[in-house]
Image: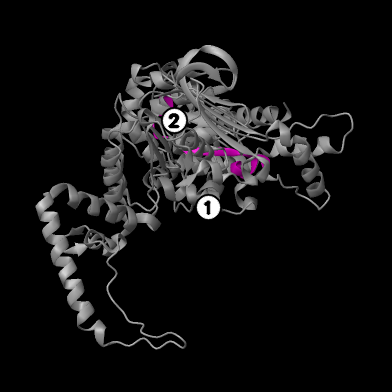
Amino acid sequence: MIEELKVYGFRILNDFAWRPKEGLNILVGANSAGKSTVMDAIELVTRGSIRGQNARYALSPDWFNMQQVKDFFDSLNSPDKTPEIPHITIVATFSKDPRLARIMGCNGPDGAIASAPGIFITYRVPPALHSQFIEEAMRLSRLGSPPIIPTEYYECSWRAFQGDPIVRRPSEISCSRLDTSPERHSRIIDSYAQNYVKTKLEDDEIREVSSKFRRVSVQIDQGILANITVNCSDQENLGLQIDKSPKTDWTNSIVLHREGLPLSVLGSAEQTLTKCAISLENSANESILLAEEPECHLSHTSLKKLIKMLNDAANDKRQIFVTTHSPFVLNRLGLDNLSVMANGHSPHRITELSSETVRYFRRLSGYNTLRLVLADTSVLVEGPTDEMVFTWAFRKTYGCLPEERGIDVIECGIQHRRFLELAAALNKRNIVAIRDNDGKDPAHWRQKAESFLSEHRWFICGGLQGGSTIELQMINANKKHLAELASVVKSPDASDYGLKCYMLDNKTKWALELLDAPAIESDTLSVPPYMQEAIDVIAPAMEGDVNE
């Protein structure tokens, strides 16, 4: 198991350090946060290759950290600075295990450390080539922007903490990458089928099939193909025959089928699930598994099957890393396995989420917890009616939509406490939860969430005097404007009782009419007090964070 991963100078990752969990790790973050780079770093350091290409030949100028590159080229034009040549270092330290004795030592790239099992990979310019490298870099810098790092001067070194170079991938630290893209389905599936048949046939059966295949090939050579003449200028006696080299061995014609249909003609989801099942089975003895956005190309039903495969595959002998943009995947795999990335910084790992809340979201996976995880500023509301009313109220107050100010309004049903618990576990700021009182003292609801609140996390509940639901709160806030309210929400009855009946019977409809109404028609209406309190709290708090 990887106990700690350190990355320096690799793409967006600079001075990156992460201590993943044993077993399952879910890595989430916004686009370009560095999730894929982490997966590539793990593959590079554990396999000495990346996406099938040997690490020694895979280096690209795009791999170097942009800030490193900028600082280097800036220093070339400054006589007061010594150029620091960009380099890449990826270090994986493993938990102590007798099976890893061969890679245990004190010779990590950071200097003397306590003896530990580990490996690292570096890309550096040898000291003897520094002057040549700098000269070439200066020539490139004069050609224009952006300057490019001349990678031909770099050497790749792959070593164990024991001190020795690694010539081939250590069998004790095997790593595989689960590829759910449809492009490589057939090759992986067919390879599995071809290898599988060899394990199921006895030697004499293999010889018998090979003999029959060869006889058929000869018959075709001497029959149909013998009658075909190849006409080519200046070339005589050219003919055709069946290729009998190993690449055309009869096993290469073996494919998997389901009910007589080759898998290659089935849907991409069926191919993906089959490929994933095969990859998981083939990697059963491998210690590390990488799965990048497994939700891609899969329907909801197929995705549930894949998630079950991943959950079943996670055990005390295997470490699994999953990246995802799906709240369903996140919830099903368990929020307690979550690490959050932002802008290449070291991930924040959840450690203080109750098992009850983890189990709740695992079972009821439709909640969009990922929006809360990734949002900078959030407003938690019960349902679509509350979301639309809050959006209208915010627009009325600030003249713009919440999202235009970086505020994400998230529906959480009546699970405010669980969402606030998740926010507290992530130490998130600028979150306000809003709910109806449902006929109970607001102190009752606040008490349930109290332990997860702070000076940057608030809970606001509608007062009893305003009514038990958002409809009653809206009506009571507009006692002097019932006719205007009825006109805006399209109620046929403008009386207090008529509005209550209409709005309670048409919860989403009236809120949609309010949100879509021209500002000139709805601006005379008042915002329910608890909604206005939430707006007055969250918007200035967000601005304070920006100013900081």
Kind of residue at badge 1: Ser
Question: x, y (%) of residue 430?
Answer: 58, 27
Question: x, y (%) of residue 389?
Answer: 52, 42
Crowd rating for badge 2 (residues with CA inside 10 Å; few <14, some 14–19, many 20+): many
Give the secondary structure at mark 1: helix
Q: Is 527 placed left or right of 466 in the picture? A: right
Q: Which mark is residue 436?
A: 2
Q: Quadrant of residue 177?
A: top left
Q: Name the residue under label 1.
A: 487
Q: Is 545 placed left or right of 449 in the picture? A: right
Q: Residue 529 carries which label?
A: none
Kind of residue at badge 2: Asp
| Residue toward you, 534 or 286 | 286
Residue at (68, 33) in percent of width and height: 126
Question: x, y (%) of residue 173?
Answer: 38, 29
Give the secondary structure at mark 2: loop
Q: Name the residue at the right extreme.
A: 79
Q: In which quarter of the image is residue 447?
A: top left
The quarter in which the C terminus is drawn is: top right
> How far apart are labels 1 and 2 at the CA level?
24 Å
**Between disc 1 and disc 2, whose residue precedes?**
2
Residue 189 at least partly seen: yes
- 506 lies above or below 412: below
Identify the magenta region: 398-417
